[in-house]
Amino acid sequence: MRDEIKAVSVACDHCRFKCIAMGLALVAGGAAIGYCVGTCVARKRDRINHCIKLSSDKVVDVAEMEDIGDKKVYCRCWKSEKFPYCDGTHNAHNAQSGDNVGPLVVQKKEAA
């Protein structure tokens, strides 16, 4: 009788080990799949500019100093309808996302 109990106990331990090993394998596999999916999705979101001159390799705008006048406000959030000039669109973006982007202000230095 004792031999039968030991055999059942050993078989039970073997099943328990298999269940634990299988559970750990499933968790590790799920974590690996989740990591891969997460990095793929994150790479697609890396783009900042979603609408301005998308066919260009690099967006470059030139402003002549003489054209600036006393003050110009340039967009840095890529959401302005008047790009490269700021139209305040970043305010709504900041309120929605908690971000803190703002414009680049270029102005003449006031004489002392």
Image: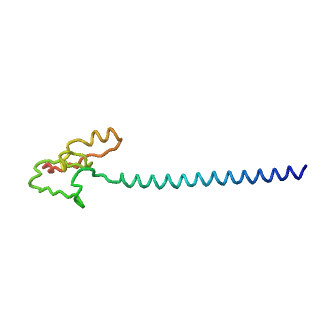
Q: Is 75 positioned to the left or the right of 41 in the image? A: left
Q: Nearer the viewer, residue 60 or 5?
A: 5
Q: Is residue 94 left or right of residue 109?
A: right
Residue located farthest toward the left when viewing the structure as drawn: 66
Figure colour scheme:
rainbow
Residue at the bottom extreme, as displayed: 57
Give the residue displayed 24% in from the left and 55% down from the top.
54
Q: Would residue 51 be found to the left or right of residue 45 on screen?
A: left
64 lies left or right of 5 = left
Q: For this rendering, which residue is in front, 8 or 51? A: 8
The one nearer the camera, 71 or 108, is: 71
**Picture quadrant where residue 100 is located:** top left
Q: Position of residue 85 (x, y in %)?
A: 18, 48
The percent position of residue 59, horizontal first and vertical second, equals 22, 57
Q: Residue at x 27, y 52 (%)?
A: 49
**What residue sits 24% from the left and 61% below the top?**
57
- Determine the residue positioned at 82% across, 50% down: 8
